[in-house]
Image (cartoon, rainbow, N blue to C red):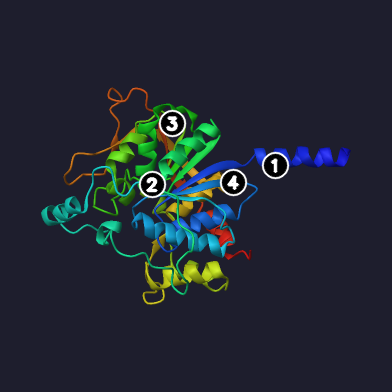
Amino acid sequence: MRLLAGFLVVSGLWGATRDLVLFDTDSGLFGDDGAALVMLLRSPSKVSVQAITIVPGNVWGPQGAEYMFHILDLLKRANLTVAMGADGPLLHTIAMAREWGRRWGTLSYIGAFAQDPTAAVIPAPGSKLATRKPRRDAVNLLISEIERHPGEVTILALGPMTNIALALRMKPDIESKIQRIVFMGGNIRVAGNASNAAEFNFWFDPEAARIVLRSRIPQKVMFGLDICNLAPIHKAEFDQIAAVHTPVTELFREDLGNRYPGFLKKPDAVAYMWDSLAAAYLLEPEFVTKSEPRYLDVHTTWGQFYGSTVPLDRRVAPGATPVTVMLGLDFKRVFGLYKDRLTRVD
């Protein structure tokens, strides 16, 4: 009995040290969102992923859910809840993006706006469509999980922040009940990757990003392009992972090798860890070597600077908390973590 009691105490302490994570994603086939999910699910002593919520961004919601189901099947985690949220950004539209391009030049990347939102969902290459369907209550799910675990939940936001902004608008009191939000998005000292001024996640739904940055969430941790640009994936890094043959690395090889950035056809191509950096922070935050606090806002007037990250005028949001902006990293350390989690055998 004493041994059993000791085991239960140790088990309880082990569980208590794990982050409870809500994984909000605009996942494509694999890319950085899928890698981020694999990293977390293969780190059960560090984090417990409570649910996956889908937001439009890289692809529209139904397709993103299908890709998430495929990755969960590869990891034998079919029981994890997947829920779709908003059907699109709060205000931004395909027409606005097209008109932006007509007036100010070609946008570097427009994600789901380049796709037909009514197109049929397709399976991942070499697989069949998932037999299960996502829930359609992602925003309510976010609210309920935060209220069920006040002060304990980390939101990992890897796409546009539409779902999170809607949750904050529906239930403003949850702001102070969120332990922290760790997000990939924004840019401060470097150029954008959607327009020259704006990073894609902020550009796709600037109004949502503004709501989150002006919120009272106690901790906001930003992995913007300033630090993501310091974590490039070249073919040498790609080859280290693709050389290991598991279902996950085969999907990694298919996506990064034949799609973006296309290493198998363009050996000089470059990708970046992006969302994987934000996920890695939940596992080994020590890889970050430089950060600074800032009060930040998002430019929401439609024009050339739509979606760009700007300083916050605190008079308009006096309750807003600062953002910890990540600026430097130990790439060897974080890539080692990334490689280890992606190449493990389940």
Give the residue pinned by disc 1: 14
Report the side of 117 relative to 340 (left or right).
left
Q: Residue furthest right?
A: 1
**Label 1 amino acid?**
Trp
**Label 2 amino acid?**
Gly
Q: Is residue 141 visible?
A: yes
Mark found first going from the N terminus, 2 or 4: 4
**Label 4 amino acid?**
Ser
- Using the numbered discs, state the Cα–Cα distance from disc 4 to disc 1 in whole angstroms: 11 Å
Give the residue pinned by disc 3: 217
- Using the numbered discs, state the Cα–Cα distance from disc 2 to disc 4 in whole angstroms: 21 Å
Mark found first going from the N terminus, 3 or 4: 4
Percent position of residue 12, x then y: 71, 38
> SS for tag 1?
helix
> SS for tag 3?
loop
User: Label 2 crowding class (10 Å Cα cut-off): few <14, some 14-19, many 20+?
Assistant: many
The residue depicted at 49 percent of the width and 66 percent of the height is 237
**Label 3 amino acid?**
Ile
Give the residue pinned by disc 2: 85
Q: Which mark is residue 55?
A: none
User: Label 1 crowding class (10 Å Cα cut-off): few <14, some 14-19, many 20+?
Assistant: few
Percent position of residue 22, x then y: 50, 44
Percent position of residue 102, x then y: 12, 56
The residue depicted at 29 percent of the width and 51 percent of the height is 192
- Residue 307, quarter of picture: top left
> SS for tag 2?
loop
The residue depicted at 57 percent of the width and 72 percent of the height is 244
Give the residue pinned by disc 4: 48
User: Label 3 crowding class (10 Å Cα cut-off): few <14, some 14-19, many 20+?
Assistant: many
- Residue 311, quarter of picture: top left
Q: Nearer the viewer, residue 220 or 40?
A: 40
